[in-house]
Image: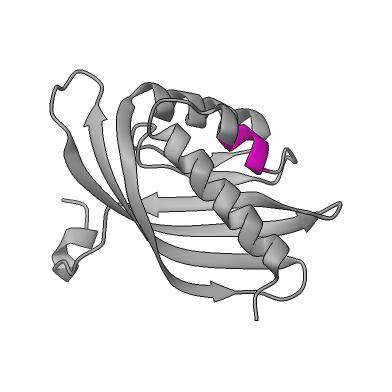
Amino acid sequence: MVDSDFEQAVEQYHQSVRDFVKGNPEPQKKVWSHREDVTLANPLAPFGPVSSGWSQVVETMELGASNIDGEVIGFDRIATYGPADLMCIVEVQRTNLKLAGTGDMSRANLRVTSLFRLEDGAWKLVHRHADPITSPRPIESTVEK
């Protein structure tokens, strides 16, 4: 059984994602750990390497939020894992997005892995990886040409 404090932290995180896709990164900053071991692999920042350390993660969040406007349709949780002080969730995030410089809303589904750590009695996000691979693809798509 998953702890209710953890589920409350996940709901706060989901709300911060809803704000993020509307262009506001500030609530995201509140759900993240501010320690230097945090990492973020965000496809909206734009595509780039993994950000590591609080200052890089904040920079990536701000850049990503400045490039989008949209709405989260929902989160489909696939799995929850974890011992007492480290929890991981795997989800598909369903979103409608309008990218900067475009006028049209488009569907953007992301497969997301989020890792939380219990810090001073509160659950904080320490890693998020999101990518657009939510349907089967040929193995050849994984190789650089």
> What residue appears at the point 64 percent right and 42 percent down from the top-left corner?
31
Q: Is residue 113 left or right of residue 127?
A: left
The answer to whether residue 50 of the structure is visible from this angle is: no
The magenta-colored residue range is 28-32
Image quarter of residue 88: bottom right
Question: Would you say residue 4 sits in the magenta stretch?
Answer: no
Position above or below: 34 against 131: above
Q: Residue at x 77, y 73 (%)?
A: 84
Nearer-the-camera pick, 58 or 52: 58
Color scheme of the displayed model: one colour
**Is residue 65 shown above or below 82?**
above
Residue sitting at x 64%, y 50%: 126
Q: Give the image location of residue 16, x and y in percent.
A: 52, 40
Q: Nearer the viewer, residue 10 or 66?
A: 10
Name the spot of residue 145 as percent of width and height, x first.
Answer: 15, 50
In the rendered structure, the answer to whether residue 134 lies left or right of residue 57 reads: left
- Where is residue 78 shown, x and y percent of the image? 41, 72
Q: Is residue 7 left or right of residue 100?
A: right
Q: Residue at x 38, y 37 (%)?
A: 48
The reply to whether residue 15 is in sight is yes
Q: Main secondary structure of the magenta part?
A: helix
Decide: is 74 above or below 95: below
